[in-house]
Each structure stands twice: as structure tokens, then as C-alpha cells.
Image (cartoon, coloured by chain):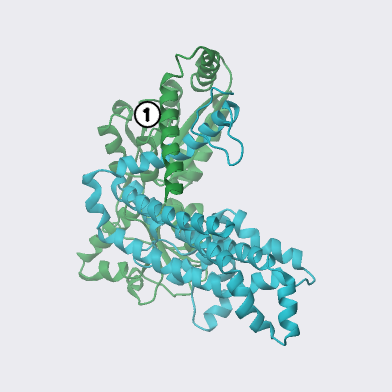
Chain colours: A green, B cyan
Amino acid sequence: MMRMRKPLIILILLLSFVSGACGVAGNGLSATSDTETFTNLIAQTALPTSAPQTRTLTVFAAASLTEAFQEIGKAFETAHPGVKVNFSFAGSQVLRTQIEQGAIADIYASADHKNMDSLIAESLVASNSYQDFTTNRLVVILPEGNAAKVQTLKDLTNPGIKLVLADSSVPAGNYARQILTNMNEDSEYGADFSSAVLANVVSNETDVRQVATKVELGEADAGIVYFSDAVAASDLITISIPKQFNVIARYPIAILTNSPNPYLADEFVAYVTSPAGQVIMEKWGFTREN
Amino acid sequence: MNSSPRIFRRIKTNNSPGWEFILPSLVLIGLIGLPILALVWRSANIRIFPYAFSESAINALKLSLITSTISVLISLLTGTPLAYIQAHWTFRGKAFLDVLVDLPIVLPPSVAGIALLMAFGREGLFGDWLNLIGISIPFTTMAVVLAQVFVSAPFLVRSARIGFASIDPQLDEAAKVEGASNWHVFRHIMLPLAGRALLTGVILSWTRALGEFGATLLFAGNLEGKTQTMPLAIYVGFEQGLGIALVLSVVLLAVSFVLLVLLRRLELQSQH
């Protein structure tokens, strides 16, 4: 037992030593020059406005925006020489968590209001920059060949159908469940429609693109994704969801409070909402509904 | 170098390692130790305890324990004979086989997940055959186990191979002269002598199976009670609020810590 204990004590001692050293590093004489170069390095990368070198704009965007924003990013780079747009695409809830944990970015584009609103409440995005820039609808997708022979929305309740949804923490997963609840109200589907469909769920994916991929691969018999996801993945069969049940997914965009390039971010948001930007959004299946 | 701390006691000589060794080490110790410390620190909070007993946390814990145990049993039953062959026989393509079996150790888990889908997915290489006998693996608990075996078995095989190889070949020959069969030699000489190496392998592959994330997410999906193991529950929980993720992380940390302490005791014993 003694053998086990001693290294542990040493470890704890060393840990406290390291954390102490971090606190006083700025005062140490030998450390000063290093600290200065380090600060300069950070200044060069984070605040490049002083020199007309490449400026990098970091955009955190919902996974469903992947293709549309990549194209908008290219168009924006062409219109602004010397600007590089970097994207991080993931579930809106993943990006929101990353921003809460201190990730540095310029722009956040979410697939729902819930995630954006919590960032506004935490003053992490500039509320005056907040605006809806596009809308999306949801569809049911089936793999090529449709081996499970799903013909109508009612068939989603067929026993043994492998249905994949996004997790309920993901905007698309939340919308999909809302739609199923809406269908419960209709006598054609019946009050237990939603629970019958949810019983067929074999996986709750962490972003909507994973849903599309699992269906594309033919591993799942059906999935519920955005219309734009079905446009991006060409070889899928889609079943549309009638308007009275469907939800309109409103996508908000905003500039982060700690954006390293707020002016450039402003220009990017302006481009996204401009007619040129909206043409690209429509091309990828997004709409602008009121 | 007399100024270095006197907490060090070298095995043979009495001097301390010197700052040029201690300082770089401190950087790494801090990098590994501080996040662990922070994790424990943040979870030492009464408010998050209700999460520890939430249904999804317990479901994930149960599933992780069951699947990783099955995975280790499969690895043990199939990996031990393989390691025995690798340690005691040479044959054409042996070098290739050695590399193949070690491959999952260095392979990114996402690659493992895609490879498993390509092989055993419904549309995979063997999907049609499996469909014929009515088996569909993706999105099932079996897929979780397969992913875990894929990534964790190589640790067991490696350890067992080293254990078997270190046994004096004369023992084997002597037993054969006495008329013992291959099976008898394995059962009564090799297994007991390589027992410690096998146990080491079991612990290593168990911790790896418990921590498996990427391949599971791709191949088995994420469904509570069926395919949502602890690492997946941590990932999903992280986005819904830190509480559940913190509690599960600390549980996994504790289990891994205990397993590693066991491993260390085994290693110390085998040195004596």
C-alpha cells in the first residue's frame, strides 16, 4: 500500500506546482520575452485588420447548411479578395455548446431559435445582429430501391421498419417529433400514430446529416430530414409531409459578441441575406416563408 | 543539480533527475492531470447527483457493462488461440497476419465504424448473406459488441502473444516427449504460465471496449437501452446540459482508474 501512496502524493504536489507556475509566469524575468512573442503571435492571428493579409472568417453553421454555405463561402471569398471563410458544420446544439465553452468564431447560424436564444440570454451573440435568413421544411426520405416498401406516411408505423431520426436535442429531431405529434390530431392517422412511429426508431443521430447518411447507405428504411438534405443527397426517394402537419424550421444567424472580425462578419451576414445569397440558398432547397 | 527537489529517490543512485528532466515532465503531467482534476472538481457538486440516478444514465451504465463483458469474453475465447498460434508457429503470411491483427490499435475509430458498415451493414459486402439467414446487424446491441471486439481484441491478442512467446520452448518439447498433445500442453503448461499476460490483456481490452465511441456511433447508432453506451450518453448528454455528461464521465473515469490500478499491481507482481 505504501508503494501506491507515495507517487500519488508526488503527483498532487507536482500538480499544485504547475498550476502555481501558470499564475506567476508573467512575472518571471526569463519568461517575459517568450510571453511577448506569444502575445504577438496571438495578435497576428486574431486581429489581422491592421495588415491587409489573409483574413479568416470563422462560421459555425448547422449541419443542414453544409452545401449551401460552402457555396456562399466561395462566392463571398471571390467578392472579398484576401478573405478566407472557414466553416464548422455540426448539429446546432453541438455548436451552441462549443460557443458556451469558449470557442472563438465570428458567426453562428442555427437551425432553430432555441439554441440561438440561449446564446442571446448568455450575451454570447450580439442580439442586434440576430435575424432569420432562411426557412426549411421536413420530408421523409427512403433509400434507393425502398426495400421496406414504404409508400405513405402511414407505412412508417409498419412493424419492423427501421426508422432513423435525429436526437431530440438536435433541431431536426425536435421538429420531426413535433410533426408526429401534429399528425396525432388527425383522425386519418389516429392518436397513437406518433408512439407507433417512434417505436420503430432504431437510432437517434447526433446531427441531421447522419440521418441522411444512414438512409443513403440503405442501413435504415426511412428517416425524417430537411427538404434541403434530400436535395443535397440526390439518390433518395422522398415522401412529402402535408403542410398542415409540417413545421417551418426558421434559421437565425447572428454575430458572436467576441467575434475577432465583426465588420467582416457583418458583410458575410449581409451577403447571405442579399438576393445573390438567397439564390444559392434556394438552389439547395431552402425557402423563405413567413 | 543539487537544487532539485529531494522527493526523488532513484532506484540505485541517490541523486535527483535534475530540472532539465523535471520541467518538461511537469508540462505533460499538467496536461494530463489538470483536465482529470478539473473533471473531478466540477462533478464534486451536490446538484448534479440526481443525474447519476437518472434512467438514461443507469441504462447506459448497464448496457456498457454488459456489452464490454461480452466483448472481452469473445476476445478471450478467439484471441487466446490466435495469440498462441502467432507465438509458437511460423507460416506463410504470418507477418501480414501480425500487422492485420494489430491494425485496429492504430486505426481511427471512425474508420473502424465505416469498415464494419461496409462489411456487415445491410448493404455491406456480406449483408446479402446475413439477410438470407434473417440477421441484420446495424442498430442492434450485437453491432455494439462487434464494434467493441474490433477495437479492443487486438490489445488482448498482443498481450497474450507476448506472454506465450516468453515461455521457454524447452518446456513444450519436454512435454511433447512425454506424449502430451498440443491441447494438453496448452491447457496445463501454457495457460497457467501465461495467465498474468492474459489477465493484463483482459484488463486492457476491457477498458478499451468500455471507452469505445466512434465505431459504435457509426455502426450501431444511438438508442437508449439498446445501443447507447456510456461514451455515447456522455456525448449526447454534453449538449443537453453538463450534469449528466459530468456524472457519467466520472463513473467511467473511476472504472478505468480501478482497472489500471489492478493492471499495475499485476505488473509489479510479475516483476518479483
Q: Position of residue A134 (x, y in %)?
A: 37, 41
Task: Give the total number of marks visible in the rendering.
Answer: 1
Depicted B263 relative to depicted A261: above or below: below
Image quarter (top left, top right, bottom left or bottom right) of the C terminus of chain A = top left
In depth, the one of B12 and A213 nearer the eye is: B12
For the point 34% across and 60% down, the residue is A241
Q: Position of residue A127 (x, y in %)?
A: 29, 28
Q: Chain of mark 1?
A: A
For the point 40% across and 69% down, the residue is B66
For the point 48% across and 75% down, the residue is B136
Q: Secondary structure at mark 1?
A: loop
What kind of residue is marked 1?
Leu
Q: Is residue B157 left or right of residue A277?
A: right
Q: Position of residue A52 (x, y in %)?
A: 57, 16
> Residue under circle 1?
A256
For the point 45% across and 60% down, the residue is B210
In depth, the one of A130 and B23 nearer the eye is: B23
Residue A49 visible: yes
Residue B224 visible: no
Q: Is residue B25 left or right of residue A27?
A: right
Mark 1 Cα-neighbour bin, 10 Å: few <14, some 14–19, many ≥20: many
Q: Quadrant of residue A221?
A: bottom left
Residue at the bottom extreme of this rendering = B179
Q: Is residue B192 left or right of residue B249?
A: right
Q: Position of residue B63 (x, y in %)?
A: 37, 66
In depth, the one of A193 and A17 nearer the eye is: A17
